[in-house]
């Protein structure tokens, strides 16, 4: 099992009042990919609500193997969510992957 964590900050000009809606839409679309992309077993998007973090948005996902992770990252359904929802609103991407 591989844990895939990705974190972002919103762009400075992204409206505060739209952050919640973006996180919910991204969460719903990513969760819908479970079962559609080989090896993807879990996906969840979270909006930070606590002080002390240096990122505002978090993606937590699980895939079965490192090969599945590589395929997930370029899968058209995943790329669509990133391109249509996340990339236009965010910056400062940080990623951490590890095997369980």
Image: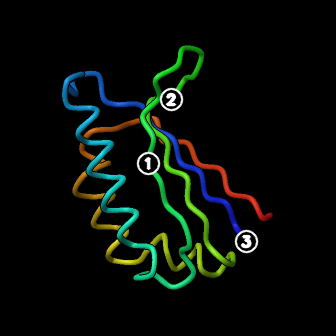
Task: Tell whether 26 sits left or right of 51.
Answer: left
- Front label number (1 vs 2): 1
What secondary structure is found at the residue carrying circle 3? loop
Which quadrant does the N terminus fall into? bottom right
- How packed mark 3 is, by other alpha carbons closer than 10 Å (few <14, some 14-19, many 20 or more), is some
Q: Is residue 77 above or below residue 45?
A: below
Mark 1–mark 2 distance (CA, rounded to whole Å): 13 Å
Which quadrant does the C terminus fall into? bottom right
What secondary structure is found at the residue carrying circle 2? loop
From the viewer's side, name the closer residue of 84 and 100.
100
Answer with mark 1 or mark 3, whichever residue precedes in sequence: 3
Mark 3–mark 2 distance (CA, rounded to whole Å): 25 Å
Residue to which mark 2 is pinned: 55
Residue to which mark 3 is pinned: 1
Mark drawn on residue 45: 1
Answer with mark 1 or mark 2, whichever residue precedes in sequence: 1
- How packed mark 2 is, by other alpha carbons closer than 10 Å (few <14, some 14-19, many 20 or more), is some
Res. 65 image quadrant:
bottom right
Residue 85 picture location, percent across and down: 25, 51
- How packed mark 1 is, by other alpha carbons closer than 10 Å (few <14, some 14-19, many 20 or more), is many
* Residue ID at (61%, 72%): 63
Res. 52 image quadrant:
top right
* Residue ID at (45%, 81%): 35
Residue 45 picture location, percent across and down: 44, 48
* Residue sticking out furthest to the top: 51
Q: Are marks 1 and 3 in contact (CB under 8 Å)?
A: no
Answer with mark 3 or mark 2, whichever residue precedes in sequence: 3
From the viewer's side, name the closer residue of 85 and 93.
85
């Amino acid at each position: 099992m591989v844990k895939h964590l990705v974190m972002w900050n919103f762009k400075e000009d992204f409206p505060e009042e739209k952050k919640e809606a973006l996180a919910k839409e991204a969460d719903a679309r990513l969760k819908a990919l479970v079962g559609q992309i080989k090896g993807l077993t879990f996906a969840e998007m979270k909006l930070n609500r606590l002080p002390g973090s240096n990122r505002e948005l978090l993606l937590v996902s699980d895939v079965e193997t490192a090969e599945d992770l590589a395929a997930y990252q370029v899968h058209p359904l995943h790329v669509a969510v990133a391109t249509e929802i996340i990339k236009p609103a965010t910056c400062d991407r940080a990623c951490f992957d590890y095997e369980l």
